[in-house]
DNA sequence: GACTGATGATATTTTCAAATATTAAATTTT
DNA sequence: AAAATTTAATATTTGAAAATATCATCAGTC
């Protein structure tokens, strides 16, 4: 079964293809009667304009490119849900790629989507990305780009983030208020903005409370569960048992959590722990973990809204606003 | 910055566009020297064929359409991860839509992707889908379609599933072996194949053990956490406390789990519980829950492999094979 | 040596479907 | 009847690829 084209309608009505096109697009220079006939027949033949032909002419599509480190990660899949939700209601579809935390793959994906002429990009960068040339290329070509959560600071484009420094400071201050003094921090790649800012928040909280910042209580690693596990392990090996831990994100906190349990230490009695992101699991483990809630679904929605405004030129490209979402400390039993 | 086209290269080398095209596509009737020149210049100018123009001519794309009920659901996001992984390595990208468990939206998504000329579909149907006309339309148009997990039986196309009846039977038999006799079942929409089959497995296990199937211990609901919570609630209100529960999936089990805890009953001493899907949370709650592991990532990969084989005509369309994955009972402390 | 046929190399035209700019015809107004 | 207006046809554009056309050159034949 072939798809109906503008020509099929034209032939049947013995008029030209352009008249059909103009009738369907409600041009004022087409007779009302002709328009009616065209529209009727189009409906009857189940006509749908070929988006590919349209895209070839206009050099753009109704597709939004989304690149995230890992689709199956709680935070990202729920942000993608939010993006899809908004995109769907604006007539866009989403092309989703994962970088697998690899810079190279992120570049390849960016280029592939660019060549597919996606109307715009929503990106959360990989752990290993520091170079932003592939994003600069998009901006040079005036292709709208919005970062969410993990953004590249030097690229001047709208960003949807949370106030990492502030909410980290709130989280660590909460630990201090609970009476903890020897607070460790497990951070991620120092090139990543969110890591830098959460680290900064940690230091600010300690400073405000006149507590010393001791380098030996800070462990540098990645963003996965295994990294948290390893960091806790190294603290134990160094015989440095903190009375609280602030982890850069939930997976890292969960990893530390497991290692603490394995060591026979009690949470929160021996070591209190705070994560970051409010992954679903944090509320279901024993004890449920204190964490910072990032409204992932809403962040995805907001990023999509901004991008679509940019695509539809409702926002000037040079209006590089950053939307900061409120992150909320959720106090549970691990602190 | 405009994209380089075949014409740009042709003009610079003072040859025709078709020569460039044929040179790049390694046609035998082009002089080696010409080919070399063309390829060099193409590389220098960063030439990339416009996939939209290509698609217009060929009437197909390098895009795979994926429709799932909810992207953020553990099982689906991890299956999508698997699909993307395979697609990426075969040069495909994935367009992801969610039906939000709505039949209408599933139909709209199917049509939208069809009009976008996706090369094929990977679908897990919504809870409310019983009519399969939108899928028949795809098959009529010879567009490859693969179902995974939630399939529509009457549509004759490859399916990637697990043996729901068998693994449910194994799960319930496990409960019986633990000495439980009054085993309740929380099922989902009866029109859904997976629900029917899991229900069947439940009944088979009871029959084999000569246990009665009592209708009052069977609760009908949806597939969400709230449904499990409600089902458990209704059992309690009816004053029917089973000694074990087999839930159609993990969210439903988790919902029941919460209600049981709220009722002050102990797991597994008072009520044992088995879920289905091995969602990540099941291993992290207290007590960790016995469940059936569905290899979601692998199922996604397999579905993508089959689809790509169909797209590339390595499989005849009428070879409607069903791939049944082994699901494995994971015994934890809730039973 | 002129002619035929084959082959090699490249050019031209058409195709895909829609949108749009230009042109032309028909109709109405002055 | 000329000018203005309405309406719709024709031609072009988008980029790549395929079908077809052109034009040498060379081998072989009479």
Image (cartoon, coloured by chain):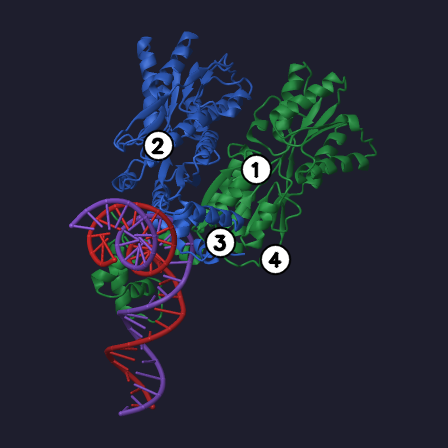
Chain colours: A green, B blue, C red, D purple
Which residue in the protein does label 3 denote?
B4
In-front residue for pair A203/A219:
A219
* Residue under disc 3 on the same chain as residue under disc 2: yes
Mark 1 — on which chain does it sit?
Answer: A
Q: Quadrant of residue A332?
A: top right
Give x and y (percent) for residue B2: 51, 56
Residue A217 at least partly seen: yes
Q: Which of pointers 4 and 1 lies earlier in the amino acid sequence?
A: 1
- Secondary structure at badge 1 equals helix
In-front residue for pair B268/B164:
B164
Which residue in the protein does label 1 denote?
A104
| Label 4 crowd bin: few (<14), some (14–19), many (20+), radius 10 Å | few
Q: CA distance from mark 4 to mark 1?
A: 28 Å
Mark 3 — on which chain does it sit?
Answer: B
From the viewer's perspective, is residue B334 above or below residue B192? above
Which residue in the protein does label 4 denote?
A318
Which residue in the protein does label 2 denote?
B309
Give x and y (percent) for residue A217: 76, 26
Q: CA distance from mark 1 to mark 2?
A: 27 Å
Give x and y (percent) for residue B237: 43, 24
Mark 4 — on which chain does it sit?
Answer: A
- Secondary structure at badge 3 equals loop
* Residue under disc 1 on the same chain as residue under disc 2: no
CB within 8 Å, label 4 to label 1: no
């Amino acid at each position: 079964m072939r798809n109906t084209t503008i020509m099929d309608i034209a032939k049947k009505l013995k008029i030209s293809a352009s008249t059909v096109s103009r009738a369907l697009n409600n041009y004022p220079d087409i007779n009302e009667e002709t328009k009616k006939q065209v529209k009727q027949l189009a409906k009857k033949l189940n006509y749908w304009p070929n988006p590919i032909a349209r895209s070839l002419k206009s050099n753009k599509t109704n597709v939004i490119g989304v690149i995230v480190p890992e689709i199956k990660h709680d935070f990202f899949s729920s942000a993608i849900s939010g993006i899809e939700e908004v995109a769907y209601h604006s007539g866009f579809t989403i092309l989703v790629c994962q970088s697998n935390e690899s810079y190279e793959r992120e570049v390849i994906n960016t280029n592939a989507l660019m060549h597919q002429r996606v109307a715009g990009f929503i990106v959360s960068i990989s752990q290993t990305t520091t170079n932003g040339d592939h994003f600069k290329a998009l901006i040079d070509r005036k292709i709208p780009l919005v970062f969410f959560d993990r953004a590249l600071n030097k690229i001047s484009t709208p960003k949807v983030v949370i106030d990492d420094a502030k909410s980290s400071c709130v989280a660590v201050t909460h630990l201090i208020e609970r009476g903890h003094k020897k607070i460790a921090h497990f951070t991620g790649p120092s090139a990543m903005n969110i890591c830098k800012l959460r680290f900064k928040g940690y230091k600010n909280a300690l400073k405000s409370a006149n507590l010393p910042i001791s380098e030996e209580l800070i462990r540098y690693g990645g963003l996965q569960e295994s990294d948290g596990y390893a960091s806790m392990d190294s603290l134990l090996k160094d015989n440095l048992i903190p009375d609280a831990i602030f982890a850069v994100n939930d997976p890292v906190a969960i990893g530390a959590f497991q290692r603490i349990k394995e060591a026979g230490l009690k949470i929160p009695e021996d070591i209190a722990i705070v994560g970051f992101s409010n992954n679903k699991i944090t509320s279901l483990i024993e004890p449920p973990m204190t964490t910072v809630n990032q409204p992932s679904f809403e962040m995805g929605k907001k990023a999509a809204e901004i991008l679509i405004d940019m695509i539809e030129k409702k926002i000037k490209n040079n209006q590089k606003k950053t939307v900061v979402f409120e992150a909320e400390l959720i106090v549970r039993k691990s602190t």
